[in-house]
Amino acid sequence: MDTINQFLADLSSILWGPWLLALLVGTGIWLTILLKGIQFRLLPYALRLTFSRERTGKGDVSHFGALMISLAATIGVGNIAGVATAVAMGGPGAVVWMWITALFGMATKYAEGFLAVRYRQVNHRGEISGGPMYYLETGLGWKWLGVWFAVCGALAAFGIGNMVQANTTSAALVKLFPIDKIWIGTALAVITGLVILGGVKRIAEVVSFFVPIMVLLYFGGSLFIILTHLEQLPAGLSVLFKQALSGTAASGGFAGATVAQAIQWGVARGLFSNESGLGSAPIAAAAAKTNQPAKQALVSMTGTFLDTIIVCSLTGLVLSTTGVWTSGETGVDLTLLAFKAGLPGDWGKWIVTLGVVTFAFSTILGWCYYGEKCFEYLVGENYIRYYRMAWIIFVFIGAVVKLDLVWNFSDVMNAMMAIPNLIGLIGLSLLLSRETKEFEKGIRDGTIHRFD
């Protein structure tokens, strides 16, 4: 087992090397140029569109519901632990590189959402199915790439979207309550089953209620810390931008970091957090009720903005303004230390722990939908119930076992998802550009309604 784990760890470090990070960011830059900075020009419209109700068009859930499924899967432990790890390894300047990655990633997320709706299909049950596997097969005509993506997506979901999240939830709760992990795993599996057995509509209903609350709670705690440390905010922001370009000297328990390390960790954790280019989010985008691919694409684009520019930024600013980033801690422990320093009593411990638990659980729900749609592409919708049953079982297993091998396996599968998806985005980018121009022209001349 140790040999397999080491092999996967080595393979992961190769796949997630500079070449893939450059390809992910480079694709975002290319799409930004091709779409003339659509993420900047149309962001206000996209945010308004997110809360509009589509009255026409096929789909299983609303714009907002599709976005919430996507955010449920992307706003997770990466926003709490991932940002802290980036700062601990690359210095505060890594946060700036997370922002830069996200700004270009918004164009990538737009492209994924557009193509997902453009090439989605209706299965025999009348449900919508879409995602990279469909635009790779129908758009590019390369079914083998679609199969590649679907196999990796269905398997990766059990790792990063299931067992890792269940394990994180279990570990967080054990620190607060004297409960055996078996009971935590049982409760988590039962609750998960009650939601996912109801299909995409129930998942959308639960996360549409759940996600805004958990984000507002974390937002409120973070904002309180920033406002009560307002005198440190200018210095905290200065540290972020200065060290993004000059590196970070050793200080306290922090060993120091170069500019290259700030870039590497900022880009890597930014992509891990918002999943732009991974190919997961367009699976949810395809389910949206809409008559225009560009509309849901714009809504999908806001997911990266909310995930990284808003939520991740809050974590980064809390770490920099409280000054605890030099402590030598990393991951969740570093974020917990910052919230304990910034909030009175045990509020910091409760907010971070509750954030970890709720973010992780929402990821379990979102990734279940991603995984089952990949599975459906491979074997058909008649076997989905078996996937859901297996999902519930693995939630229990993830809550009670150690997961080093699962982490490494998930990293490998995620990289293997990104590669065919990026091929699809680049290969269909000219079609994307042409049809986006037609959509914008229709909005301007009134032949396409802005909000229905």
Image: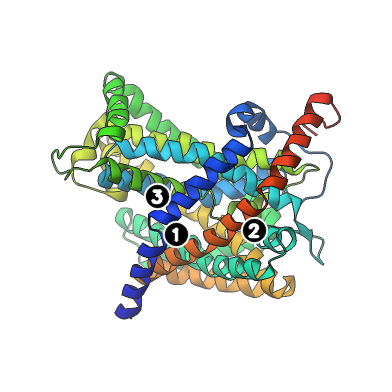
- Among the 4 quarters of the image, the one containing residue 223: top left
- Kindly identify which residue carries mark 3: 268
- 16 left or right, relative to 68: left
User: What colour scheme was applied to this rendering of the protein?
Assistant: rainbow
Can you give x and y, in whole percent of width and height, for residue 219 in the image? 44, 34
Can you give x and y, in whole percent of width and height, for residue 328 in the image? 19, 46
Name which of mark 1 and mark 3 comes first in the sequence. 1
Residue under the image location 27 percent in, 35 percent down:
345
Q: Is residue 326 above or below residue 156?
A: above
Name which of mark 3 and mark 2 comes first in the sequence. 2
Can you give x and y, in whole percent of width and height, for residue 52 in the image? 72, 33
Amino acid tagged 1? Gln
Q: Is residue 129 above or below residue 375?
A: above
Q: Is residue 187 above or below residue 383?
A: above
Do the residues bearing badges 3 and 2 touch, measured as CB atoms within 8 Å? Answer: no
State how many labels appear.
3
Amino acid tagged 3? Ala
Distance from the alpha carbon under mark 1 to that under mark 3:
19 Å
Residue under the image location 37 percent in, 43 percent down:
266
Query: Foreground: 187 or 146?
Result: 146
Query: Foreground: 176 or 15?
Result: 15
- Kindly identify which residue carries mark 1: 165
Residue 415 is marked as none
Q: Is residue 287 visible?
A: no
Name which of mark 1 and mark 2 comes first in the sequence. 2
Q: Is residue 185 visible?
A: yes
- Kindly identify which residue carries mark 2: 132
Say which element carries label 2: helix
Q: Is residue 12 above or below residue 315?
A: below
Do the residues bearing badges 1 and 2 touch, measured as CB atoms within 8 Å? Answer: no
